[in-house]
Amino acid sequence: MSDWYGPNSNGLWSFMTSFIAPEDQTLAPEGANALNEVTIFAGHTVTFDTQDGAAAKSRLTADGETVSKPADPTRSGYIFGGWYKEADCETPWSFETDTVTADLTLYAKWTPKPVDPPPAAKTHTVRFLDGGTELASFTVREGGKAAPPDEPVKEGYRFAGWHTDPEGTEAFDFETPVTGDLTLYAKWAALPGGEDASSGGGSSSPGGGGGSRPAAPITVEPSEHGTVTSDRTGAAYGGPVTLTVLPDSGYGLESLTVTDSRGYQMRLSSQGGGKYAFTMPGGPVTVRAAFTALEEEQNCPSRAFPDLDAGAWYHEAVDYVLRNGLMGGYGNGRFGPDNVLTRAQFAQILYNQAGRPAVTGGEAFADVPPGAWCADAVAWAAERGIAGGYGDGRFGPDEPVTREQLAVMLWRHAGSPAAAGRELSFSDADRISGYAREALRWAVENGVMSGRGGGVLDPKGLATRAQAAQMLKNFLEG
């Protein structure tokens, strides 16, 4: 057989170098009849411009046909967002319905991967003691300044300030940055002509003995659907107080706060059985409680965990996350409602909520080996832009999540929706990190997160598992 020729008399066709023709053409050997003719159909070249991503091969397709989709390209530090008809990526290309009618170029769309901020700042505990009694305890960020609690009162004595030593020789300057855990001691000076009834003399440093202390009132505000009682109507400075919470049938405790005259919340410790204890400050306090309706008792997964209180504020939220498979307990049979939530745990929670989809790739982190229990969840969260690394190749799976970090991850999981524009009115709004401000505005605006009482949002505070359960419930039911 002689060579094949195109439609031109001298158009020798090369099967090694010739491509699909721009218009229908017929090839035939010289002198051949029509039965030996071969028709080459018109086609077009589709070029894939990855716009700084890994190269993708061009494809040939027949006129009026769809083009097959190439493998998703990759680009360091970015998330691939599909193929578009224009370089500025305004109109997406559909590989199922769009057809090729001319040579064309499709463009890859990229979104920068978010880089999470460094781990939460180191914090220190500042304790205030009078003798052997702890009057207050606050958490202060590394390099921050401690704020004194209400000034204590002692009959027959004048409060002489807070000191760094029990003997009261070194006064503490509250303008000093806090760089480590700190214990401060109350110093007392006897009033002129006064006498300490318990010591028999006017000691200027009563530390361990202490005179009689006037009782400050304890006000318990009435609540609907439950009652709160105090074991006393008033207590002296530093005295222990126990509250008993009794919800009505079908209700559980939603919140319980004890605030002093300046709006500071006292630290409550659960004693079990609906009892909570706190230490009396140097002034009156107000107790407030709120109760919420519970679901039917037979549908209460919290009862499987001995450390969960069915009357606690978190009960309904923990039931919700347990019932929906978002969270579970530890291997020791406990739930750990007051345990601090970690980055890996929250990534796993969101991964569970998404239905645990297959992970095709995702960024690799040096501190998350492929066989780790959270490996798929971390890869999924990074791939979706919900949680990234720290920029040094680490994810920090065991590092605690702050309240603002938790809000940011939920916000990204929701698609980073815009807030309505209302500014946050909390007294500590200036402590919100710049990257988290929009997320917290959205979270507060939509009831996902609320303040912690006294007009405080506490963005840098660490989130507990119980708090995360409540925010998840608020987010998913909102």
Image: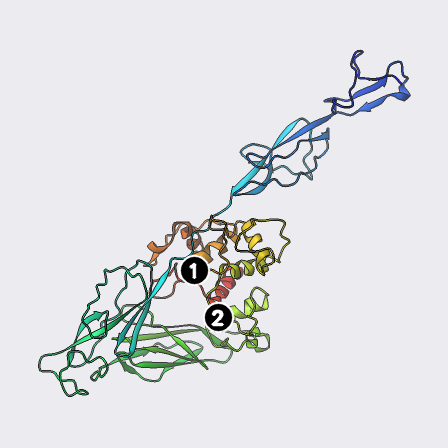
Residue 311: % across, % down: 48, 77
Residue 208: % across, % down: 24, 82
Relative vertical location of residue 77 with respect to residue 251 in this rendering, above or below: above
Is 241 or 137 nearer to us in this picture?
A: 137
Task: Determine the image quadrant of residue 153.
Answer: bottom left
Near mark 1 (Cα within 10 A), the count class, few <14, some 14-19 or many ≥20, is: many
Question: What mark, if any, has residue 337 been given in the picture?
Answer: 2
Relative vertical location of residue 67 with respect to residue 358 in this rendering, above or below: above
Which element carries disc 2, helix, strand or loop?
A: loop
Q: Is residue 281 left or right of residue 118?
A: left
Q: Which residue is mark 1?
A: 403
Residue at 13%, 85% (x, y): give it.
201
- Mark closer to the chain start, 1 or 2: 2
Residue at 89%, 21% (x, y): give it.
36
* Amino acid type at image mark 1: Arg
Near mark 2 (Cα within 10 A), the count class, few <14, some 14-19 or many ≥20, is: many
Which element carries disc 1, helix, strand or loop?
A: helix
Whether residue 123 appears in this view of the structure is yes
Separation of residues labelled 1 and 2 (CA atoms): 15 Å
Question: What mark, if any, has residue 321 been given in the picture?
Answer: none
Which quarter of the rendering shows the N terminus? top right
Residue 139: % across, % down: 34, 65
Q: Is residue 308 left or right of residue 269?
A: right
Residue 84: % across, % down: 59, 36
Q: How many marks?
A: 2
